[in-house]
Image (tube, grey):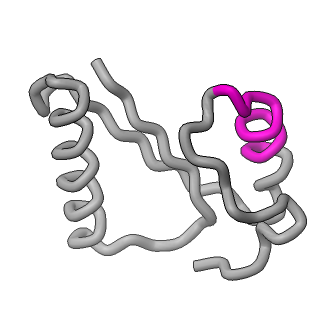
Amino acid sequence: MPHVSIQHFSRTFSETEKAELVEALTETVTRVFGTGPEAVSIAVEPVDPSRWTELVWQPQIEARPHLLWKQPGYTPNATTEGTQ
């Protein structure tokens, strides 16, 4: 039962963007985990850039690096740049 959780800077997604993201993630997760699409759940949570370090960087990236399969290419001080 794979569950994908994405946290991102707040922004509005179109219905097309939502559908494209769900389709691409579901296809990849079902292929890699060898499961059907009914087993996959996806959560998308907006996080205000001013709270990114507190809510995401420190508890999930800095405190749990052993769980990261891809390291971010930014530092927490740069998280308010390039918002979209």
Q: Is residue 75 above or below residue 59?
A: below
The residue lying at 23 percent from left, 44 percent from top is: 28
Question: Which is nearer the eye, 37 or 69?
Answer: 69
Question: Which is nearer the eye, 48 or 30?
Answer: 30
Q: Is residue 53 above or below residue 39?
A: below
Where does the N terminus fall, quadrant-wise? Answer: top left
Q: Position of residue 51 (x, y in %)?
A: 81, 55
Please identify the residue farthest to the top as the structure is shown: 1
Q: Is residue 22 above or below residue 65?
A: below
The residue lying at 50 percent from left, 47 percent from top is: 6
The residue lying at 89 percent from left, 66 percent from top is: 77
Where does the C terminus fall, quadrant-wise? Answer: bottom right
Q: Position of residue 50 (x, y in %)?
A: 83, 63
Q: Which residues are magenta?
A: 55-66
Q: Is residue 64 magenta?
A: yes
Q: Main secondary structure of the magenta part?
A: helix
Q: Along the horizontal axis of the image, is 10 left or right of 31?
A: right
Q: Position of residue 66 (x, y in %)?
A: 68, 27
Q: Position of residue 52 (x, y in %)?
A: 77, 55
Q: Is residue 51 magenta?
A: no
